[in-house]
Image: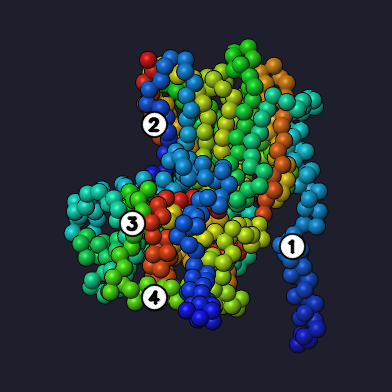
Amino acid sequence: MARAVVTVPARAKRGEIVEIKTLAQHAMETGFRRTQTGELIPRDIIRSFSCTYNGVEVCRVELHPAIAANPLIAFTTVATESGTLQFQWVGDNGYTVTEIAPIKVE
Amino acid sequence: MSPRLLLLACFAVARAWAGEIAPEERRSGYEMMSRETQKIQDDDATNPGMLWVLDGEAMWKRKAGAADRACADCHQSMRGVAARYPSLDAARGRPVTLEQRINSCRVDHQKAPLLPYESKELLALSAYVARQSRGLPIEPKIDAKTKPFLDAGREAFHRRQGQLNLSCSQCHDDHWGKHLAGSVIPQAHPNGYPIYRLEWQSLGSLGRRLRNCLFGIRAQVPDLGSEELVDLELYLMWRARGMKVEAPGVRP
Amino acid sequence: MTTRRQFLIVAAALAAPTAAKAQLDPNLAANRKAAFQEARRRIVGDTLVRPGRVKLTLPPLIDNGNSVPLSVTVQSPMTEADHVKAIHVLTEKNPLPDVVSVRLSPRAGRATFSTRVRLADTQTVTAIAQMSDGSFWSDGAEVVVTLSACLEEGLI
């Protein structure tokens, strides 16, 4: 099941700033909602997102319940060399998702 | 022709068209959203509905059921399919929705259990199929066999109901574009379904949306997949004939 | 045998604390504003925060408070010597003041970030940028948030 999807340009020129867009499938339960009978629905959110580029961290995000469900995280990075971008989402209740995207830099 | 007869004739014509939106005046719900929300739909990289489409694609290729068959084993492109639904099911003698057809296939051909309405799996499959009709004009087939159901749906759309004694037509034919509290009233065309609705924070079907509306006007809410709901869906798709499919749409 | 009167008094006494807890806090606005100030202080300490260099973009009138597109861009060369270390977004009226914190480095190329947020009420959203030289810059954006016309109460 597609837990997350990342959009990265397949190729870029060295030094070019590329745009990266990521989507994760997650309800981001805030912990403030109540059921019809009044019970509090416990918090269950993605807490952090990180992107590494050939092993070097280039972006780290701390998420709070105010981030909308199915979070979009979009940022930029400099295309330094060809290799692999790795994305990781970590959240409550042992949630952890990893996605990989190759990038070719000319 | 006497003036009186002319007047009566004009009145008759006006009455027939009263409430129905002229074909050239039809607008997708897309046009009534903010530019920012439109952008979410436009870009597959930011459209949350695509998460379900991708799930659907994976399911499409996966073998399932006692027959150990994948959808992909029998079907190639589903281009144009969603644009024709609800469609006549010969065995049942009445139109069925895309979700119902998917379930029929699962039971009859894959020997797999039914997927519950609004389940993640059923929505994923219908989103994957509907996505392949994106940009195509809606054209449900109306002939002698399906016309009675279309008429039933039309009647339901124009019928006053519920504690608020409102008909769908009153808001969506007569007052579209105006505001209900902070929301703009759309014309209620189903061209984006299944949609990622911001209010739901999830993908959902037309059936779910109709039930929400009926609940909102304090009317009796028919079950998902019920005949009266499908008849109404058929009428809505016919009412939107020619408009482009936008699935998976994003809506407030 | 307990009289009805005694029973009602005991029941009311037991229910009162839980009822009071479930009730909306009468000082809600003030408490949330205080939480916002506290969160802001946690980020910047005593350092002065200057308006400018940061551009926080939010639609002025949103379609639905459940999902509001938000982006922040900070003017910065993003070099080793001069770059944005972090961008923080805060609100005054949400149940919690923190929305998101983004850690950046010169590898980012541009100090820019987009996401979608939940906003509980019409309010001002604040973005604070933390620079490599220890300075803080900020921008605010006002958003009008309305409830959906028909609430569905969980009906699927």
In front of the other: B221 or B133: B133
Nearest to the eye among marks 2 and 4: give it.
4
Of the residues shown, which amino acid type is indicated by label 1? Gln
Three-letter amino acid code at the position of disc 2: Ile
Q: CA distance from mark 4 to mark 1?
A: 49 Å
Of residues B50 and A86, the one nearer the viewer is B50
Disc assigned to residue B82: 3
* Residue to which mark 1 is pinned: C23
| Residue A88 x/y as whole percent | 46, 34
Q: Amino acid at mark 4?
A: Asp
What is the crowding at mark 3: few (fewer than 14 residues within 10 Å), some, or many (at least 20)? Answer: many
Q: Nearer the viewer, mark 2 or mark 3?
A: 3
Dot 3 falls on a residue whose secondary structure is: helix
Contact (Cβ within 8 Å) of mark 1 with mark 3: no
In three-dimensional space, the C-alpha distance between marks 2 and 3, rounded to whole angstroms, equals 32 Å
Residue lying at the far top of the rendered structure:
C81
Quadrant of res B238: bottom left
